[in-house]
């Protein structure tokens, strides 16, 4: 199997999926960490959502009730909206160790990502019954990590709850633009999928069937739970979303916007981006690619870059300094943005070259943008060049401080 199976605007035939499923059984995991090691401080993003789906009769599951029907839906991925993620698998294989191909759909490309059911929970106590399974990603998946899907019943209240919990990071991408697209749109698709998962299970309770489960019987005795939504996230969205009772998202800070931010900084002042990064890395080392990280983390390098950055602040105001969009200056800023973009990326992220390219592109765009703004300030608004330069210096300091705070 190729590193990543993907196609443009179309999926795979049944025969193709069957052949790929056979090969999926031989694929290794695309990560090495144990589940307890997948923490935020070790580079793993955390996403969790849970909601009350319905209320059934109190007491343990009877084997022919709402819990049993929901269990059937969970096993067959009835919670997954096929417009976003469609699961391909062989129902005749045992649940534990089952190979699954998840067809991830976006605007344009489709990705066929291999996973394996690495663990199954089917347990009960006097107070609660829990059933679910864990998906482990395999080589060729655009993400790496583990994700639990758990259905539980509270014996006292009859409350039926669905819980999704994942630890993940970027996996393998077939090309650089897929990686950039994932960074730009991945979280949006992820949140939509989580909310739709709970909504689809509630729809099963309401109507007695889902799109992929027309054989389900009418559940006349089930009362649909309609609890208000509470949204919890480290990313403030500014609004509450319907469909889940609780959602938690903890995402690593070395993301696309930080890379772009350091590129913009390099376009404003070529030495500012590497100088600030070196200062941060020399004081509090963070994950960065091998080689570049050690060079920038050196205290001597940090001092040299600080002196160069200070000299640039002075030279920027001198009348004989060539414009930043002259070829030599532009190349220097692009290289500075590339260095900063690559240094921000964590070592487990394979597309660090795309981070460097993105940083360089942001530096070039920033150079032209701030050159035009400087011309506007001095020629049309009549500001002295020194004053306009000092205003830009203040912006450099402000943006740099925010980027360092985000990294921490």
Image: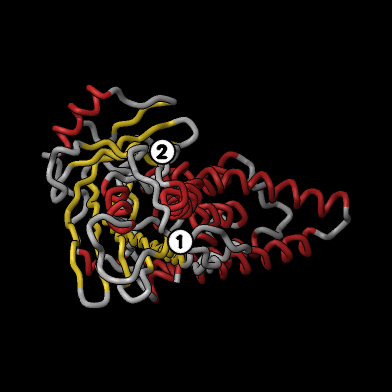
Q: Position of residue 364 (x, y in %)?
A: 58, 44
* Element under disc 2: loop
* Mark carried by residue 119: none
What residue lies at 33% left-to-right and 44% top-to-bottom? 142
Please indicate whether residue 396 sits to the left or right of residue 189 in the image: right
Q: Nearer the viewer, residue 172 or 188?
A: 188
Residue 117, image x and y in percent? Answer: 19, 50
Locate the N terminus by quadrant: top left
Tell me: residue 128, above or below residue 217.
below
Q: Tell me the residue that label 1 is attached to.
A: 223
Q: Residues within 10 Å of mark 1 (few under 14, many from 20)?
A: some
Of residues 384 and 1, the one nearer the viewer is 1
Mark closest to the chain's N terminus, 1 or 2: 2
Residue 75's spot in the image, x, y percent? 26, 48
Q: Which mark is residue 211?
A: 2
Give the spatial CA distance, label 1 vs label 2. 20 Å
Q: Is residue 288 visible?
A: yes
Residue at horizontal 66%, vertical 58%?
Answer: 316
Secondary structure category for the residue under label 1: strand
């Amino acid at each position: 199997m190729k590193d990543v199976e993907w196609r443009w605007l179309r999926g795979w035939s049944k025969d193709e999926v069957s052949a790929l499923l056979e090969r999926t059984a031989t694929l290794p995991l695309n990560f090495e960490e144990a589940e307890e090691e997948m923490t935020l401080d070790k580079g793993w993003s955390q996403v969790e959502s849970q909601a009350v789906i319905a209320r059934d009769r109190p007491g343990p599951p009877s084997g022919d009730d709402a819990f049993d029907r929901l269990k059937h839906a969970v096993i067959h991925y009835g919670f997954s909206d096929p417009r976003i993620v469609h699961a391909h698998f062989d129902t005749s294989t045992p649940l534990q160790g089952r190979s699954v191909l998840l067809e991830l759909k976006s605007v344009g490309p489709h990705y066929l990502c291999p996973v394996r059911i690495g663990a199954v929970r089917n347990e009960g106590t006097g107070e609660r019954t829990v059933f679910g399974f864990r998906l482990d990603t395999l080589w060729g998946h655009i993400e790496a990590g583990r994700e639990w899907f758990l259905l539980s019943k509270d014996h006292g209240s009859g409350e039926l709850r669905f819980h999704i919990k994942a630890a993940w990071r970027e996996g393998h991408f077939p090309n650089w633009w897929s990686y950039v697209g994932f960074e730009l749109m991945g979280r949006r698709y992820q949140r939509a999928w989580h909310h739709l998962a709970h909504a689809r299970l509630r729809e099963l309770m309401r109507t007695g069937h889902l799109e992929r489960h027309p054989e389900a019987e009418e559940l006349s005795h089930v009362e649909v739970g309609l609890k208000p939504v509470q949204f919890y996230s480290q990313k403030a969205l500014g609004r509450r979303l319907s469909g889940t009772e609780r959602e938690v998202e903890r995402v690593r800070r070395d993301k696309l916007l930080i890379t772009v931010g350091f590129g913009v900084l390099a376009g404003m002042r070529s030495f500012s981006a590497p100088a600030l990064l070196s200062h941060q890395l020399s004081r509090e080392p963070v994950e960065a690619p091998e080689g570049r990280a050690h060079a920038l983390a050196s205290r001597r390098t940090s001092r040299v870059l600080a002196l160069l950055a200070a000299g640039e602040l002075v030279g920027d105001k001198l009348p004989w300094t060539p414009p930043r969009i002259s070829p030599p200056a532009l190349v220097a800023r692009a290289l500075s943005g590339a260095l900063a973009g690559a240094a921000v990326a964590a070592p487990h992220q394979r597309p660090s070259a795309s981070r460097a390219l993105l940083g360089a592109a942001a530096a070039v765009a920033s150079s032209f943008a701030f050159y035009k703004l400087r011309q506007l300030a001095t020629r049309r608004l009549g500001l002295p060049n020194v004053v306009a330069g000092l205003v830009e210096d203040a912006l450099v300091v402000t943006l740099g401080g925010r980027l360092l705070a985000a990294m921490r």
